[in-house]
């Protein structure tokens, strides 16, 4: 079969595309809305100045760390919940959610206590700029109060994805966006007679919006009697055998996301240590790129549910066929999305009130990002979508995390402290891991060793 024939087989396979997009599109929309909340926060804070922008960016690194740890727990649990959904084993679905909630709330409490009790010490790990630290403390101490409700809501939403009920998340996130945006405008700038609280106003708005989001998700799930919610006994009664299997699958994912999240925060440390202007450019680039990256988060999660369900239904050959089609479909989409990033970068001067040197750096960073997008997107769908869905989480951890810490981070850090090369070169070094990860991922998929049933 020629390559052209293979592409036609993928892009004209209506059943495959319809199934994938039915799951992926609502996830994309929900993640887009979540990313848009972050962008609005950044835009509004950016109107206050570069110091405030950098402070909130660093303060959000703790939320980012928690988010990825929760994603590790949730996506590891999705290996079980998607396969339980394929088998229509609702008790298995509910006990998996129960274990996930215990882990998620524990991390939520830990992060809340740390950020409330020692925000200055935490922010000092990223930067020595006292003005940024002082402003960041005001933001972090308040915004940390959203960590526990966010953790609960995250686990509930990601379990709903496993059973292909994703519209609730879209609605809850949309309401959260409206609440957050409205309160941001009022509390940051002091509209309608309210006090102008600057970064503290943004933190308060975020906390209120997260509580609203959780209330909507839980209430609608309970009202519609979706099988993810059961009795307390179903959620929190599990035997040692299941717990052992759960930990064998989930712990590598949790460790993967934890180490990976520390790696990403180290990216921020690298740029923050150059100067505040470089870090502001890096923060803007990451914030805007989230709007396009949600497409591949949606595909990755959609693929994970699709493959996991097929494995649970004992349709292994069909799962492998879908995996092959994904590997042809994703790179083409990534090329077009990556190319769209470059013109988007020219909108930055109209959105952010920052210095010309920051704007110039942003444009260069976007060019690097656009060139690396296809590799990054393929790795996302292989390591997060396919490998995790097949229960091959240990390989995913090794490939995704160790290469990052062995190649990309040491290279970027060395260049940043031992040379005077511009920020875009350092940014390119952060993507140096992607080619090797792609080669290893393709080899693993071709070997067939990635596919396992974990619910038997």
Image (spheres, helix red, strand yellow):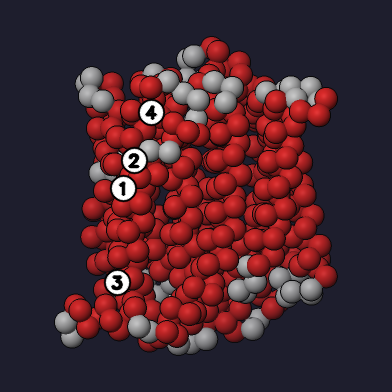
> Is the residue marked by circle 4 packed among few (<14), some (14-19), or many (20+) residues within 10 Å?
many
Task: Tell us which disc is closer to us: 4 or 2.
Answer: 4
Residue 78, horizontal then vertical, whole percent: 56, 66
Q: Earlier in the sequence, mark 3 or mark 4?
A: 3
Label 2: how many Cα within 10 Å (few below 14, some 14–19, many 20+): many
Instruction: Name the secondary structure under disc 1.
Output: helix
User: Depth check: 434 or 347 in front?
Assistant: 347
Q: Is residue 138 visible?
A: yes
Q: x, y percentage for residue 310? A: 48, 82
Question: Which residue is located at x 30 percent, y 84 percent?
Answer: 9
- Mark 4 highlights which residue? 359
Quadrant of image for the N terminus: bottom left
Marks 4 and 1: which is nearer the front?
4
Distance between the Cα atoms at labels 1 and 2? 6 Å
Residue that sits furthest to the front in the current view: 350
Which residue is label 1 attached to?
Answer: 370
Mark 1 crowd level (few <14, some 14–19, many ≥20, 10 Å Cα): some
Q: Which residue is mark 3?
A: 328
Q: What residue sits right under mark 2 in the picture?
A: 366
For marks 3 and 1, the one nearer the N-term is: 3
Which numbered disc, 3 or 1, marks the residue closer to the eye? 1
User: Regarding mark 4 in the picture, which secondary structure is present there?
Assistant: helix
């Amino acid at each position: 079969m020629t390559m052209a024939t293979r592409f036609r087989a993928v892009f004209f396979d209506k059943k495959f595309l319809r199934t994938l997009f039915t799951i992926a599109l609502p996830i994309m929309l929900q993640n887009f809305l979540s990313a848009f909340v972050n962008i609005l926060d950044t835009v509004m804070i950016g109107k206050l100045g570069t110091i405030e922008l950098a402070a909130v960016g660093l303060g959000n690194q703790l939320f980012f760390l928690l988010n990825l740890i929760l994603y590790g727990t949730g996506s590891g649990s999705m290996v079980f919940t998607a396969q339980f959904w394929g088998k229509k084993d609702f008790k298995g679905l509910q006990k998996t959610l129960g274990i996930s909630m215990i882990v998620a709330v524990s991390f939520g409490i830990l992060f809340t206590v740390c950020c409330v009790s020692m925000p200055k010490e935490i922010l000092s790990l990223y930067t020595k700029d006292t003005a940024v630290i002082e402003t960041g403390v005001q933001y972090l101490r308040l915004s940390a109060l959203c960590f526990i409700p966010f953790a609960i809501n995250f686990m509930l939403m990601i379990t709903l994805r496993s059973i292909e009920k994703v519209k609730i998340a879209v609605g809850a996130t949309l309401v959260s966006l409206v609440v957050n945006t409205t309160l941001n405008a009022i509390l940051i700038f002091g509209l309608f007679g309210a006090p102008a609280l600057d970064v503290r106003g943004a933190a308060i708005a975020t906390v209120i919006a997260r509580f609203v989001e959780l209330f909507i998700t839980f209430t609608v799930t309970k009202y519609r009697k979706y099988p993810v919610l059961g009795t307390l006994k179903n959620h929190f009664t599990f035997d040692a055998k299941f717990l052992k299997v759960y930990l064998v699958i989930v712990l590598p994912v949790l460790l993967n996301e934890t180490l990976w999240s520390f790696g990403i925060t180290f990216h921020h440390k690298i740029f923050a240590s150059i100067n505040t202007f470089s870090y502001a450019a890096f923060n803007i680039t990451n914030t805007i790129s989230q709007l396009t990256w949600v497409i591949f988060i949606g595909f990755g999660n959609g693929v994970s549910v699709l493959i996991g369900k097929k494995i649970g239904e004992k349709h292994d050959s069909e799962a492998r066929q879908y995996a092959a089609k994904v590997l042809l479909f994703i790179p083409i989409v990534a090329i077009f999305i990556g190319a769209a990033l470059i013109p988007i970068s020219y909108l930055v001067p109209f959105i952010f009130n920052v210095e010309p040197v920051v704007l110039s750096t942003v444009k260069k960073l976007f060019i690097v990002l656009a060139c690396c997008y296809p590799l990054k997107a393929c790795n996302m769908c292989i390591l997060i979508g396919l490998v995790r869905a097949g229960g091959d989480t240990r390989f995913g951890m090794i490939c995704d995390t160790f290469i990052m810490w062995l190649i990309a981070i040491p290279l970027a850090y060395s260049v940043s402290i031992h040379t005077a090369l511009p920020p875009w070169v350092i940014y390119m070094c952060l993507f140096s891991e992607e080619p090797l990860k792609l080669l290893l991922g393709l080899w693993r998929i071709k070997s067939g060793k990635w596919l396992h049933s974990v619910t038997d």
